[in-house]
Amino acid sequence: MKKIICLFFVFAALAFISVSAPVYAASPDNIPVENLDSSHSSSEAHPLPTPYMVIPFIVLLLMIASGPVLYHHFWDKFYPLISIVLGLITAAYYFIILHDPSAVLHSVVEYLSFIALLSSLFVASGGILIKVDKKATPLINVLFLLFGAVISNVIGTTGASMLLIRPFIKINKGRIKPYHIIFFIFVVSNTGGALTPIGDPPLFLGFLRGVPFFWVIQHVWYIWIPTILMILLIFYLIDSRNKSGETSSEEYSGRIEFRGIKNVIFLLIIVISVFIDPGVMSWVPSLHPFPLGIREIIMFSMVYIAYKFADQSILKSNEFDFGPIKEVAYLFVGIFLTMIPALQLIAYESKVLHDHLNATTFYWATGTLSSFLDNAPTYLNFLSAAMGKFGLDVNSMANVKEFVIHDEIYLQAISVAAVFFGACTYIGNGPNFMVKSISERSGIQMPSFFAYMYKYSLPVLIPVYFIIWLIFFNA
Amino acid sequence: MKTLDDVLKNKIHGIYYGKRILLPFAANFLKIVVEDDVISDFSDSTESGVIIEEKENFTNIYFLEYKKINEAVGKFKGIKILLAEKDKDIFDFANHRKLVLYLREEHVVEIEELDKEIIFID
């Protein structure tokens, strides 16, 4: 915990220095391009990074994929250091070579917002205990996952995952297999949260840019329903073949018990705080150049308060530990920093090729990148590229509103793909790793990074997403 | 050597120092879970990172991969163990016991039967 706090202060300081530092002119050796990254004003010129600077990002992704499998103990000990060092290499490149600290600043600010939301939801939901004394059947599991998908739109995919993963494992005691956890990741930790801006961070970023709150549910529900139903149908077919634990003589009362009402209130405060942003409510003061806003301060305060006042017996029953969020915090430091060059290059290429881009391109490109990169900045970059097709600026709320009204298929494709494809890998979305970690600590042997993809996401999700593309975006 | 029931009933503690945990009973260990490590290899090879030594009045467990075992587990999360008590039939699943070891301050190891609310897939 102390290390996390130190890390937080280091990044806050870095962000503060970045924002306070003068922005130097672009080096003549670099090609200045109009940056498509929504963090910057479109009129600002930013130097384009060399493609070689994608290497730290690729190295980090490869290590995240191979570390837990090939050199488990080394990775366990050194992943924080590896992630931070690779991130700092990228940061140093932007500071020293490109003289462009603003790109790093923006990533740091986004990282702090990301980790504030994730950590507060994680801690608040860790103090809630749901006891379900019921034996799981394939149908009960389907209903459970469906409930998780719906609730993830209210408390976020992170909150829903943390709240429901343990009861889900418990009701399946005696018959639990890795596929249970993986379908939980598919439905509750990812696809479920596609209906509201609270559901998943990319939609939240879109909301902050001017996409109306209810636009998402109005334009995505008819894509969400068949997607969820197809995934649940596949799950049902697989789960129906699982005969483990059927001979168990254990008796169940069928009772559902809910404890930790205090933490439900904390959870509500976190959800409400999502809206406390100068971009949403004009009366909310901006704390610029401080890298945190009022919203993030509330969220980080909730981390402390929710932990301090949680019922100790609930924390014990939930085996509450900062380990999973610590892992996410460290790994995403590296991911957020090292992906800056990758995102800028993608944005640049998108702008160059914008005449050739259509809903299909946006759907598959956003999806593929959201599987491996953080889906929030990926969403923003493709939104920026899509708007660029029509000469609109993502930094203008009026432009975003205009875009949303006239060209909804692009935003639909980007929104759906950013959320859905996050389920394709363990690193596609923050909660995926947490769910994996909690499951492993419960004694479940989870598949490796690659096995997750070739055994589950490629054969299950990609055909489903292909059908969705065929029906909705293949125009 | 104390029996496991004695230890649990009388709340007798174990102790830990560095990477070593000393438990006041003897048992045949089936599985140990520390963090993400699910360990079931207790052969003489040290590849699993755990060595178990039975002494006259206690059992030593060495966690070779950890410099300080107490730093690996959180306040609310212990080390989970699946075992069969010494002299009981290990092949009878009814004899398999699930324990959790909480590493407290001053080298104290609290030994508890695993709460049924805590998930431990055996």
Image (spheres, coloured by chain):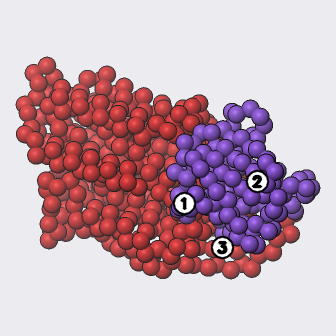
Name the residue beneath numbered marker 1.
Answer: B106
Q: Secondary structure at mark 3?
A: strand
Q: Position of residue B11 (x, y in %)?
A: 70, 70
Name the residue beneath numbered marker 2.
Answer: B58
Colour purple, chain: B
Q: Position of residue A441 (x, y in %)?
A: 61, 53
Which residue occupies the foreground of this view, A366 or A19? A19
Mark 1 and mark 2 in contact (Cβ < 8 Å)? no
Q: Secondary structure at mark 1?
A: helix
Quadrant in the rendering for residue A198: bottom left
Question: Amino acid under label 3?
Answer: Val
Q: Chain for mark 3? A: A
Task: Please identify the quadrant where the C terminus of chain A is shown.
Answer: top left
Quadrant in the rendering for residue A331: top left
Q: Residue at x 59, y 39 (%)?
A: B65
Asked if residue B95 can be seen in this view, the reply is yes
Question: Amino acid under label 2?
Answer: Phe
Instruction: Select label 2 or label 3 by which is in front.
Output: 2
